[in-house]
Each structure stands twice: as C-alpha cells, then as structure tokens.
C-alpha cells in the first residue's frame, strides 16, 4: 500500500511538472510570435519607406515603379542576410570611382584619380595572344587551378625573379584576379577566433575579407614618420596566441611604401617566434618600383617559405585589370585549401586570359621593355605630383617608392576652423574629398578607407595633361581666397 501511495504521489508530481513545462512552452511560443511580429512590423515600416523612396527615384528617372502586388510579395519575404555579409562595408574606392564615372556619363567634367588601375593599354603582344586564343577556339573551361602551361610559367617566373621554388603541379593556383587569390588565402587559413594583423594604411578589402572568413582584423597604425612601414617592435607588441596571419603589401597600396630587405628580415625574426603565425605577402605591385628601391619577396627569407602565401597577378604591371588573372603560390597544403574553395565557387580563370598571361610572362624578366616603359612614365608622373602637392601649405608628403599612388597627410587643411567658400566647414579628410569632388570636380579617396583618416589617396595613373588639370583645380579650390585654414 505504501509503495502504491508513493507511486501515486510521484505520478501527480510528474503531471504537475509536465503542466508547468507546457505553460512555459506556450509562453515561449507567444514570445517568439510577438518577436517575429515585431520584426515583421519593423521590416514592413522600413520597406514601406524604402518603397516610397524607390517610387520617387523611379519617377525621377523615368522608370515604372514597382506595382503594389509586387511590393506586397516583397514585404512578405524574409530579407535576413548572413550576418557576415550584412556586416561588410562597401569599398570606398569602388564607390568613388563609380560615382566619378557616373558623373562623367551625365556630362559633368569630373577627373577621377580614385581608381587603382594603369591608364595604359594592355601591351600589343598580350592583346594578340588573347585574340589568337579566341580565334583558335581556346574558349573552354580551364582546369580548376589553371592551365598546366601557365602554372609552369608562373613557377619559372617566381624562381627567376624572386628566388622562390614552387611546384606548378600542386603549389600554384591561378584565379580570377589577385583579389580572389587574397580572399581565398585568408579563408583557407583563418576562421572564427583568429586575429589577422593588418598594418594601416591597408588596401580597403583586407579587413572585410577577414570578417567574411569569421576572423578578426587587428589594425596596427603606422604613420608618415614611420614611412608607413610596420616595425618589428610594433608587430611584436600586438601579437597574441590568437594571431594567425600577418598581411604585408610591398610596394604598398595606398602609400607606395616599399620594405627594404633589412626591414623584412626584422619582421621575419618576430614571425619566427610565433609558431602559429603565417604571412600573406601581397606582391601585386612588385614591378612598379622606382630606384633605388628594390623589391624583395618575404617568402625568400630564411625559414619563411613554409609560413608564407604569396599573391601576385597581371593587372597592375601588365595593364591587364579587365582580364582578371592572378595567382597564389604557397606550400601544397595551403594551395590545396585555396583550390578547394575555388572549385566550389568560381572554378578556374578565363582560358583566354590565361593565354594572354603566357604572352605577358614571355615579355622578359620583370615584364621586359613594355613594363619598363610604363614604370618610367609612372616615375615621371610621381615626381610631378609630389612636387605640386608639397608646394601646397598644410600638406605633408613622403615620396613613394613604388606603386602609382601618393598618400599625403592633409590634417593641416582640415579640422576646427577650416572653411570653404560656398561649401561650409571642412572637418576631416572625408569632407575635404567631398568638397574637391563637388567644387573642383576631382575625385580622390579619403584615407579613412585605408585606416589612416588624416590622409587622402591620389592615383597618378593618368595622363600628364589630366594630372596637370587635376592639380590646377585642387590649387584653385585650396586658394586662401576661397579656403580658410584655422
């Protein structure tokens, strides 16, 4: 009887617990429903505002507005994005380049010095090879890592010019531009919880690529007084057990700074102290360099090949930006990982571009005469632009040793008390760039895009006449009669 009584009590207690759980379950459902309703209402309100704005824009542009039925369907669609994608910031260089292009297409006399591409035509021999590839039917899918012929040519180039040995069979991955190679390199070796060391100023896409991989970009600021170079002491001070990758770009975009061999060796000593730390060496500007500066590959330093992912391509040196062809060279296990990512996203690069790439590497060591001619023109333009900018009071500028950008410090022209006639206060470099675009109609990129908000980037990959006119406009816009500096 006692056992039956205890059993009955136990059953009653279990029933009470089940009832309580059911209540909590119903409460949870109610809360979830309320939250979903709140999200839907918020999305509805936001989308309604967007729809009204869209209708106005469409009306102004002469386009038909979206119908009420289509709008109703869109409002019911869950527009949630992958959080990593939602957090990505647009590239300011692309935004400003596109803006300048659209303004020109609309009939405005805008000079764009924001783009990062040579203004020269692709060398004739490369163009001919591309045309021959099309006429010869070389238009099929490429192997995932690229054609054997071009991988072998890249391997030979790395050995001859950089002192690096990479097997063309399993240590070279050709991609649709060096940008893809950088992204795949980061994704291959970094993940959630990892830190990526990025010296500022940096190329705009590095931090966003890290975030897309789930890693945390850790920005290390350098200054004009440091020649915008990362020192061994600064690197050592910022490393933690989470540090996974260091990104080095030399010659640098946006500063044009070039690391000497001794400076790279000092960095390599620090890297060697941290077994988990790898290096991504972005060498896309290696051939656009001005004496006495010399390019050195980080992977060629003692002990660094096993830790380094080398990225390079054809866009800058060979004026092949639209051909979309780059490559990654790395130890086989890293190259295989990058290849796996590529196999599930884009597959191999254009077969036509790869035939053109073969012709580019056949021009001679360091690009041969065509590249030397372009570099000589860039150096002349650099000297002209640097001279003009140094003559403007309030601008500080170190002469770049490579690439085709200048990165002047304009902090002396902005801030409290700085004012432009018919424009208003100019509080920072972003506002200065907006002023120059609106008033002088010259498009530059604010340094905030590169992690150094006190600077602006100016590309001198433009004709001599274009650069003269652009700098004349900047001079007039900063004349003391119209521009007041505190």
Image (tube, rainbow, N blue to C red):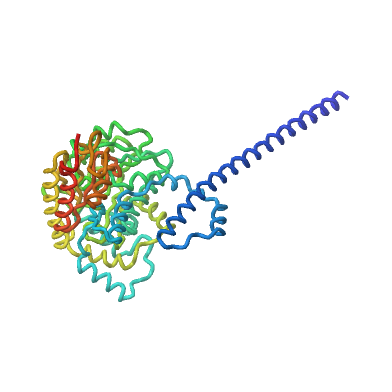
User: Which quadrant does the C terminus fall into?
Assistant: top left
Find residue 390 and report its image quarter: top left
Name the one closer to the observer, 148 or 362: 362
Q: Residue at the spot x=55%, y=50% of the render? A: 78
Can residue 151 be seen from the camera position used here?
A: no
Name the one closer to the observer, 273 or 419: 419
Q: Position of residue 478 (x, y in %)?
A: 18, 44
Q: Residue at the spot x=14%, y=40% of the render? A: 393
Can residue 262 be seen from the camera position used here?
A: yes
User: Looking at the image, which residue sits at the far front?
Assistant: 422
Q: Is residue 469 left or right of residue 139?
A: left
Q: Position of residue 157 (x, y in %)?
A: 22, 58
User: Looking at the image, which residue sits at the far top?
Assistant: 2
Q: Where is residue 346 in the image (x, y as percent from the top left)?
A: 40, 59
Q: How many labels does the image show?
A: 0
Q: Is residue 210 left or right of residue 477?
A: right
Q: Position of residue 144 (x, y in %)?
A: 38, 61
Q: In this view, does 24 lie to the left or right of 52?
A: right
Name the one closer to the observer, 288 or 175: 288
Find residue 269 and report its image quarter: top left
User: Looking at the image, which residue sits at the far right?
Assistant: 1
User: Which quadrant does the N terminus fall into?
Assistant: top right
């Amino acid at each position: 009887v006692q056992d039956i009584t205890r059993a009955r009590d136990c059953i009653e207690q279990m029933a009470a617990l089940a009832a309580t759980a059911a209540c909590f379950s119903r409460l949870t459902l109610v809360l979830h429903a309320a939250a979903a309703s709140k999200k839907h209402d918020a999305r509805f309100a936001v989308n309604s505002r967007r729809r009204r704005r869209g209708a106005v824009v469409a009306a102004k542009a002469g386009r038909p507005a979206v119908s009420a039925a289509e709008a109703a369907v869109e409002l019911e669609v869950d527009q949630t994005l992958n959080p990593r994608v939602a957090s990505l910031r647009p590239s300011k260089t692309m935004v400003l380049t596109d803006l300048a292009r659209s303004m020109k297409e609309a009939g405005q006399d805008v000079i764009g010095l924001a783009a990062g591409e040579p203004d020269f035509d692709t060398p004739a021999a490369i163009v001919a090879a591309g045309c021959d590839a099309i006429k010869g039917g070389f238009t099929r899918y490429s192997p995932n890592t690229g054609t054997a012929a071009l991988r072998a040519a890249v391997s030979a180039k790395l050995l001859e010019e950089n002192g690096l040995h990479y097997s063309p069979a399993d240590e070279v991955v050709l991609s649709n531009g060096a940008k893809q190679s950088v992204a795949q390199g980061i994704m291959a070796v970094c993940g959630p919880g990892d830190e990526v060391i990025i010296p500022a100023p940096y190329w705009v896409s590095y931090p966003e690529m890290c975030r897309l991989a789930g890693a945390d970009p850790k920005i290390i600021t350098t200054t004009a007084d440091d020649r915008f170079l990362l020192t061994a002491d600064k690197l050592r001070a910022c490393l933690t057990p989470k540090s996974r990758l260091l990104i080095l770009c030399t010659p640098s975009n946006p500063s044009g700074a070039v690391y000497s061999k001794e400076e790279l060796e000092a960095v390599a000593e620090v890297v060697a102290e941290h077994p988990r730390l790898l290096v991504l060496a972005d060498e896309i500007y290696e051939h656009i360099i001005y004496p006495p500066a010399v390019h050195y590959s980080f992977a060629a330093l003692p002990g660094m090949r096993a830790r380094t992912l080398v990225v390079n391509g054809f866009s800058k040196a060979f004026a092949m930006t639209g051909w979309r062809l780059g490559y990654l060279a790395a130890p086989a296990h890293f190259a295989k990982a990058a290849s796996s990512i590529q196999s599930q996203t884009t597959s191999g690069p254009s077969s036509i571009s790869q035939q053109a790439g073969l012709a580019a590497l056949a021009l001679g060591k360091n690009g041969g005469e065509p590249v030397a001619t372009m570099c000589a023109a860039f150096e002349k333009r650099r000297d002209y632009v640097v001279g003009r900018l140094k003559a403007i009071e309030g601008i500080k500028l170190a002469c770049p040793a490579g690439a085709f950008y200048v990165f002047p410090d304009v902090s002396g022209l902005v801030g409290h008390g700085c004012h432009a006639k018919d424009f208003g206060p100019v509080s920072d470099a972003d506002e200065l760039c907006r002023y120059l675009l609106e008033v002088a109609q010259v498009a530059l990129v604010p340094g905030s895009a590169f992690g150094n908000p006190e600077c602006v980037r100016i590309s001198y990959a433009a004709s001599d006449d274009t650069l003269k006119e652009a700098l004349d406009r900047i001079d007039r816009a900063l004349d003391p009669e119209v521009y007041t500096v505190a």
